[in-house]
Amino acid sequence: MQNKNFYREFNKPIRKNNLDDKTLKVFIGVMILAASLLSYGFWGAIIEWLS
C-alpha cells in the first residue's frame, strides 16, 4: 500500500530561515558601512573635530 502522505511530505515547499537571512543582510550592511566610513577617514575627521 502506498503512503497517502507521500505527496504532502516530499513536495513541501522549501522554507528558508528568514531570521538568518535578515541577520546576514544586516551584518553585511553594517560591514559595508563601516568599511566605507573608515576608507574615507570619517573617524579621523570626527576625532579631529572633537579635540
Image: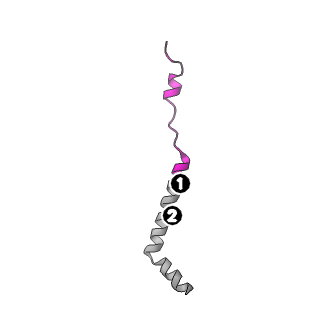
- Badge 2 amino acid: Val
SS for tag 1? helix
Instruction: Give the Cα distance between marks 2 and 1.
Output: 10 Å
| Tag count | 2
The colour scheme is one colour
Q: Does the magenta stretch include residue 39?
A: no
SS for tag 2? helix
- Badge 1 amino acid: Thr
Answer with the quarter of the image where residue 41 lies: bottom left
Residue appearing at x 49%, y 29% in the figure: 11
Residue appearing at x 56%, y 85% in the figure: 50
Can you identify the residue that label 1 sits on? 23
**Vertical position of residue 47 compared to residue 18: above or below:** below
- Give the magenta-colored segment's residue range: 1-21
Can you identify the residue that label 2 sits on? 30
Most extreme residue toward the front, as rendered?
51
Residue 31 at x, y = what percent? Answer: 47, 64
**Vertical position of residue 10 compared to residue 44: above or below:** above
Residue 34 at x, y = what percent? Answer: 48, 68
